[in-house]
Amino acid sequence: MLLSLGYKFRRGDCDFILVPALKDRANDIYSLKIYKLIRLEKFLLKYIFISIVINLFCFTIYAQDTIKQNEKDSLILSADTIQKPKSKEFSIDSKVKYSAIDSILFNIEEQEVFLFGNAEVNYKEINIKAAYIEINFNTNLMFAKGILDSTGKERGTPVFTDDNQSFKSKEITYNFKSKKGLIKNIFLAEGENYIHGKRVKKLPENEILIKNGQYTTCELEHPHYQIKFSKAKVIPNDKIITGPAYLCIADVPTPIAIPFGFFPNKKGQASGIVIPRYGESANRGFFLENGGYYLGINDYMDLLLTGDIYTRGSWALKTHSNYNKRYKYNGSFSLNYAINILGEEGLPDYSKNKDFFFKWNHKQSPKASPNSRFSANVNAGTSKYNTFNPTSTADYLSNTFQSNISYSKTWAGKYNFSTNMRHSQNTINKQVSLNLPEIAFSVNRFYPFRKKEKTGKLKWYDNISVNYVMNARNDLSTTDSLLFTSNSLSKLRNGIKHSIPVSSSLKLFKHFTLTNSINYIERWYLQSTDKKWNNDTLFSNNDTIIGYLDTDTVQGFKAAHNFNLSSSLNTRIYGMFQFKRGFVRAVRHVITPTVSFTYHPDFGTKKWGYYKEVQTDTLGNTSKYSIFENGIYGTPSAGESGRVNFALTNNLEIKVKSKKDSISGTKKVVLIKNFTVSTSYDVTKDSLNWSKVAMSGTTTLFKNLYIRYASIWDPYIIDSTGRNINKFEWQENKKLLRHSKTDWALSLNWALNSDSPLFKKKTSETSDKENKEQTDFDIPWNLGIHYTFNYSNMFVSQVQPNQKDIIQTLSFNGSVSISSKWKIGFTSGYDFQNKDFSYTSVNFYRDLHCWEMSFNWIPIGFRKSWSFKINIKASAFKDLKYEKKKDWRDIM
């Protein structure tokens, strides 16, 4: 109810009248004159008539107020505008919107508003929320504070928001006209920085002056650590400047002090110096590591320049840059160069290595260009760089680096072009392979005899299809030490290959598919091989060599073309067995028999010109060789071939009961996948027409165990030298096939964690009591196991035992969170060949809220070492840390 002479309100079982004529500040409601309504009837009769008349008059002249009922039936009063008296002049040039959940009190004479209970005021970009707010429109002042609840705890402390700046405080006094404010006990958040101040003055440009404050990155109102200062100035989105300051940890002052403080407070990129890490290495001396300068070039790109320096001569330079253009591309690149010196010069253990490493990763956004794409992933450097300068455990354990830069484009819906530059490097044997570049162009399959608007049933010639594929490549394979020498160019191989396959397919007797194809291949080379026998005598290592085979590389364009014919017939046979009872509900067997025929003529004859005869020894023996034997895309095959191929593929699966499937109540389990038996018969040979029988198949058990089987069986017997004789095993040994080779491969990838169904809560009820037995692993943990086993059994001869090889590896990793703040991680494995543990590390981590502590330990192996570190999490204080370590390079 709005009154000019007084305001009626209820507290508990009593009614009160507050007289607004008093000019006291209503920061405490009980300091005003309050009349308890003991004689309620007389008081109401006296004031009801006067109140109605005065309120109607004041409503039309001074204010327009709206009373709304909220969802909890609480009375909410909000005023959009308050009109000024004619005799006085307002300085507020915009609407002041205010509301409160409990009640709103107006002092019309003094132009004051008092807001109680979840009060909120909005003026331009300013928003204030508090338990109690009062506004004086004459003085343009606003005052806000919290109130004490029944337990004596302060609730509803003010929250002040101006544009993007927001802070909490105990009391706020703010002037709408001057935009200045006086604040007590502020709690201000600036990015990842938090500022506390006992007495604060807010300036018009949102700058803040603080007296007796604290600076920290801990978001708690009572932080774990802080930098205390007597005065400071906060410039939003720029910097924080303080006077003399000192560090306190857990409210305990430390001797760490500074004459003044300067803390960057900009959003986004900011250039600056990167403080190096200092220490001592037993092998390389005192050092400064990872010190340099960070440069925020623009909103799309940055650059980090750092370096290492050691008193015994080792040093390194490092560059790293990130770039990102929204909806276009993003990526990063780095180039590092290091001189690693170990030991003392002149001693046997002295070594000096010059190493570098380059990384580039580039990704194009799919929205940038739907028909073209560019990407890059480059990892290249010297073989020993990651031995002495690894940035991660994965880098140290990797012995193969691969790179690929690719561009692809599609147009008209049928033409495809792609180019790649590939790189592969092995740090163990130091071999480097380069493909610079690799180009592919293709035309999608099309039907030359099929009309665009074909109606009716397709004819046999309508299914004839043609497509075209072109590949071009330059290859170089050498060692990393010879990569940039002139001799490397002589090992460069190149070529172009054209393929034009023509095929057709049709159905026979509804269940068979017949496919016929003709494939034409042409190869273009700029180099060929020429061999000649030389009768000269050579002297080498006290040996005399009479005559030798001289091999030359002939430069010049040459082409080779070949073709082949093929035809295949296949079908599928399904078998299903269903069971009405039991765990297994159905067994399904799919057999896919295939018969095919392939033919190509003898391209080794003289008329083709691809093969030549050459003398190979002093006795005049000769052999045939291909002039394209070093060709990048091979050479046409010598010898006529006409093979009839037979293959039988089997897939076996079952359906079992499953409670997880609410629809069918069953699930499919694959027992055998693609178990294939294949062989062939060559109709062009005069003997040994049958090839060896090959068997292979795979299966997966328990979703984690992968098994692969492969074997080769020979239908012919062998002589004492191990060569096949045109006589079947059945004729000699009454065996259909003879075992030649068997390979078993087993791979186990098992990921376990505390959320796995095996370790979930299980409930079992006993027949006597309704008690529950529970197994619950409350501690979060995970464990990953990777195990591979390869077994090979190869037949050598009748008089020699089979050659058996076993290769197996085991690795595992995991972590255990023994509490919400403690975590232990580990990585290890077992080397069965050396009978020892492989790379092993144990990591301990402790979350200290705004601090963190870690301990990394490598107990065995080449990188045996440990390190301990405790530091502040926030990037602004990443150099405020304590670190102690025993580097693995110090014990080499």
Image (spheres, helix red, strand yellow):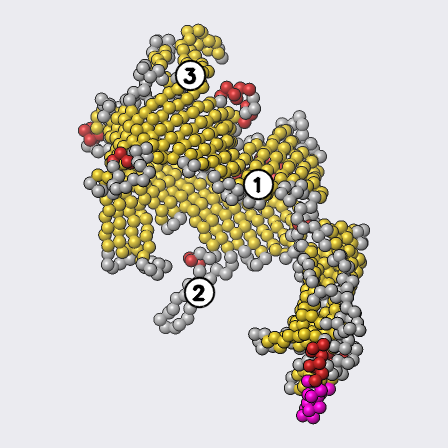
Which of 53 and 364 lies nearest the eye of the viewer? Answer: 53
Residue beneath disc 1: 331
Q: Earlier in the sequence, mark 3 or mark 1?
A: 1
Residue beneath disc 3: 529
Please state the horizontal and vertical placement of residue 172, each as a whole percent of the image: 74, 67
Which of 29 and 260 lies nearest the eye of the viewer? Answer: 29
Quadrant position of residue 507: top left
Identify the element where label 2 is drawn.
loop
In this image, 160 relative to 650: left or right? right
State which region is magenta: 35-52
Q: Residues within 10 Å of mark 1 (few under 14, many from 20)?
A: some
Residue beneath disc 2: 774
Distance from the alpha carbon under mark 3 to that under mark 1: 44 Å
Which of 80 and 564 lies nearest the eye of the viewer? Answer: 80
Residue at image point 41% right, 28% down: 470
Of the two numbered discs 3 and 1 in the rendering, the one whose residue sits closer to the viewer: 1
In this view of the protein, can residue 317 be seen by the observer?
yes
Residue at image point 67% right, 57% down: 164
Q: Residues within 10 Å of mark 2 (few under 14, many from 20)?
A: few
Q: Residue furthest top?
A: 536
Q: Residues within 10 Å of mark 3 (few under 14, many from 20)?
A: some
Q: Earlier in the sequence, mark 2 or mark 1?
A: 1
Please state the horizontal and vertical placement of residue 168, each as a whole percent of the image: 70, 64
